[in-house]
Amino acid sequence: MDLLNALNELEDLIESSGKIPLTRKVLVDEERIFDLIDRVRTTIPEEIRQAKWVIQEREKVLSDSQKEAIRIMEDAKKQLEKQADDSEITRQAKIMAEEIVDKAESVAREIREGARSYADDILANMEEHIGKLLSQIEQGRIELRNIK
């Protein structure tokens, strides 16, 4: 992941930079830090595009599962109509159709919940990384302003 690599390089740059004695301040290579900030800026849109892809995939899975549930329900109805002549077969078909519908709804619900959870995890992870990056950038800018 380029964003994490850029953040790691930024952290390494800060850690490996010369320290000002008796302070917590460091001297950093301005060109290198601006280069890393530019890399982060160009990488963030990629991360957002990946998150959008995850959301689109989730929507596709939800749509596919709903279509499958509808298909299963239609198949169950057709099967039930075929067997309507015999009362015992009809009773069993109704039970089977209800079980199929329940299972399809359960599967669709599980897929929906899993896709939402996965997308939320990805977005939360990205939010955490971006938050850390913004905090480090802000701290670096404060330190740059305070260097005299």
Image (spheres, rainbow, N blue to C red):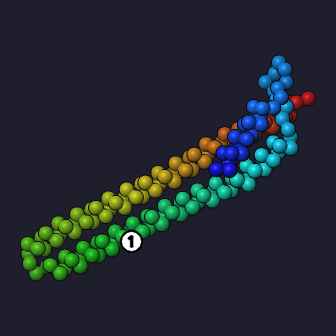
**Residue drawn 68% across and 50% down?**
2
Identify the residue at the far top of this view. Answer: 22
Q: Position of residue 89 (x, y in %)?
A: 11, 74
**Residue drawn 74% across and 40% down?**
10
- Quarter of the image where the C terminus is located: top right
Front-most of residues 144 and 43? 43
Relative to 143, say whether 7 is above or below. below
Front-most of residues 85 and 61? 61
- Which amino acid is tagged 1? Lys
Relative to 82, say whether 45 is above or below. above
**Residue drawn 42% across and 54% down?**
113
Residue 134 visible, this orientation:
no
Q: Quadrant of residue 86?
A: bottom left
Figure label count: 1
Q: Position of residue 3 (x, y in %)?
A: 68, 48
**Residue drawn 43% across and 64% down?**
62
Relative to 68, say whether 146 is above or below. above
Residue 115 visible, this orientation:
yes
Instruction: Give the side of residue 136 with respect to residue 51, left or right.
Output: right
**Residue to which mark 1 is pinned:** 67
Q: Position of residue 61 (x, y in %)?
A: 45, 64
Instruction: Give the side of residue 43 with respect to residue 86, left or right.
Output: right
